[in-house]
Image (cartoon, helix red, strand yellow):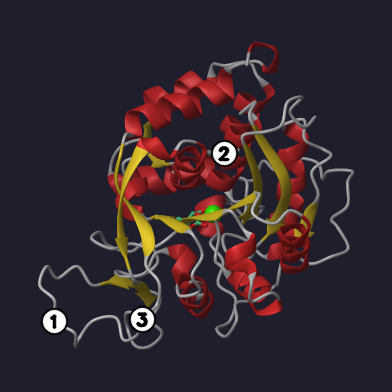
Amino acid sequence: MPPATSPRLSVVIDTDPGVDDAWAILFLAAQPDIEIVAVGAAHGNVPTAVAAANALRVLDVAGLDHVPVAVGHPTPLQQSLQTSEFVHGDDGLGGNAGPASPRRTSPETAAEQLVRLARQRPGELTLLALAPLTNIALALRMEPGLPRLLRRVVVMGGAFRVPGNVTAWAEANSAHDPEAAEEVLRAGFDLTMVPLDMTEHAWADDIWLKRIADAATPAARFASSVLDTYVALYSNARGTAGCVLHDPLAAAIMADESLATYEEYQVMVELAGHTRGATLLDDRKFDIPQGGIPDQRPPVRIAATVDAATAMDRIHRALVTPEADR
Ligand code: RIB
Ligand code: CA
């Protein structure tokens, strides 16, 4: 049920569940002062239809079966669809998605839903974007005033001073739709990026994951049940048992921005060549006009440091604390 008192934050989530997306939704659902207003399903980890079905499942587990899910655009703005079932499992939830939700998705698209809600609640809504930014770019084309209608936007995406995770240079959410990321990052939203530079600190090792697995709440049981493929991939990649909680960290920072510190930069997305999908900033400390970002786009905030230990503790607490004790 929505919070009894007026919520501190009212959030629309655009997401491609996806294991870490599912964890992020469960984390936010456990915050008594945050209202999840609606969910947009995006392509990325899985096709949009699978993302939508999984979003319905996770919301049902979280007791939020009143929250609508709208299906997003099935493909990136220009390139062909690329998905990551090798990371998240063929069903996007580690092969344990379970039975489909009895609920249906909304008749409107994710972009239409976002524009409608932003117009109905001007200045009130926070957008948490945990997927390629296709739906956000389409919403922006539908409503060019969107940057002024949304309170703020928090994006899990990009990689600046660490390697990408889809190519050596490009992080998944920007790599899976570079044109959309470029349109959104130059549009003038009050936008905070939580890049791989930060999320790589949200490492859940096997001891931490066992504390979740040992808990009896529906959220902890579901969260643990979907991990197999995801943990296997990250354990193999890192040489030690565990996984990175990208989207839950972005959700935790959205819920409490004091968890991070920030720097402001103009950000552009490379659209050509080997580095296509890379997110670029110019951090030269001397003012040379040429050779940097080629226009006067507004800056965005980039999380530069994060208290990952506190964030991980809050993610743990959200999943293992029974609803009655929150
Ligand atoms: O690069 C990590 C991001 O890409 C996360 O949002 C993950 O869910 C995938 O969508
Ligand atoms: Ca995601």
Disc 3 + disc 2, Cβ < 8 Å: no
From mark 3 to mark 1, how far is it between C-alphas?
14 Å
**Horizontal and vertical percent position of residue 240:** 30, 38
Task: Indicate which disc, 3 or 2, sits on the residue closer to the N terminus.
Answer: 2
Question: What residue sits right under mark 1 in the picture?
Answer: 288
Q: Which mark is residue 296?
A: 3
Residue neighbourhood size for the residue with mark 3, other residues' Cα within 10 Å, grouped as few (<14), some (14–19), many (≥20)? few
Task: Report the front residue among 125 and 303.
Answer: 125
Say if 266 sits above or below 70 in the image: below
From mark 3 to mark 2, how far is it between C-alphas?
37 Å
Q: Identify the amino acid type marked 1.
A: Ile
Question: What residue sits right under mark 2 in the picture?
Answer: 23
Could you tell me which residue is drawn at 71 percent across and 31 percent down? 6
Task: Indicate which disc, 2 or 1, sits on the residue closer to the N terminus.
Answer: 2
Residue 239 is drawn in which quadrant?
Answer: top left
**Horizontal and vertical percent position of residue 14:** 63, 56
Residue 26 is drawn in which quadrant?
Answer: top right
Say if 310 sits above or below 257 in the image: above
**Horizontal and vertical percent position of residue 307:** 32, 34
Looking at the image, residue 279 sits to the left or right of residue 88; the answer is: left
Could you tell me which residue is drawn at 37 percent across and 47 percent down? 199
